[in-house]
Image: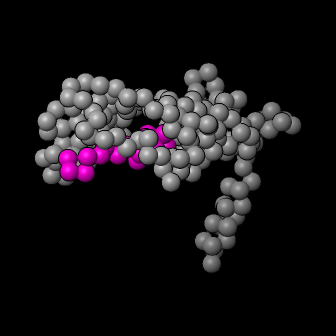
Amino acid sequence: MMSSSLIFRLNEIPEGVSEQEVSVPAADLTLGVASGAFFRVLAGFRRTNHMVEANLRVDGTLELVCDRSLDRFTMAVDGRYTVLFKDDAVEEVEDEQTAVRRLNVSGNELDLRRDVRDTILLAVPIRALHPRYLDRDGNESPFESPVSGEPASDPRWEALNVLKTTLAKN
């Protein structure tokens, strides 16, 4: 179950600009990846009569498993996301940086759980590599065979090419 500390009561958010900080246990976010103890969420609100803008900043660490060596490593997360809740929003839209949602005044709640979880998950790289496999600029360093010093070919590609050639003959 996701943390209810990320559900804010609309009537408790003052008019104008305000901030709230919460600590969210990583286990409550159902991330699907190994993670740290908690994430700090700083929610900056800007509220008027017809809309609430929530600017989120999420800080914490993720514990990931390297795709190359299967070693565990930690990665810092510093994500930002903006959600605009409008009472006249006809259609809800979102992208990698912002979302526009309907403001449900009668429900008296702003639920930011999904937005915080997605902000963290967007910080997870497609290919998780231990920092020792990255160069100074953060690019992947080539894999070198410990025996010869030459880049090693992946035997799975060779097996795939054999299969491809065999299927092409049939």
Say left or right for 130 vs 103: right
Q: Is residue 57 magenta?
A: no
- Residue 91 can be seen in this image: yes
Q: Residue at x 67, y 61 (%)?
A: 160
- Whole-percent x and y of residue 43? 37, 31
- Applied colour scheme: one colour
Q: Residue at x 58, y 33 (%)?
A: 61
What percent of the width, then of the height, locates residue 118?
A: 44, 44
Residue appearing at x 47%, y 46% in the figure? 3
Q: Is residue 116 magenta?
A: yes
Residue at 60 percent of width and 71 percent of height: 168
* Residue 123, position as x, y percentages in the image: 49, 37
Single out the residue that lies furthest toward the bottom.
Answer: 170
Q: Seen in the image, is 18 located left or right of residue 126? A: left
Q: Is residue 87 above or below residue 52?
A: below
Relative to residue 65, is residue 41 depicted above or below? above
State the residue lying farthest toward the right: 147
Quadrant in which the C terminus is drawn: bottom right
The answer to whether any part of residue 102 appears in the image is no
Q: Which residues are magenta?
A: 105-122
Numbered disc total: 0
Where is residue 126? Give x, y as percent: 54, 44
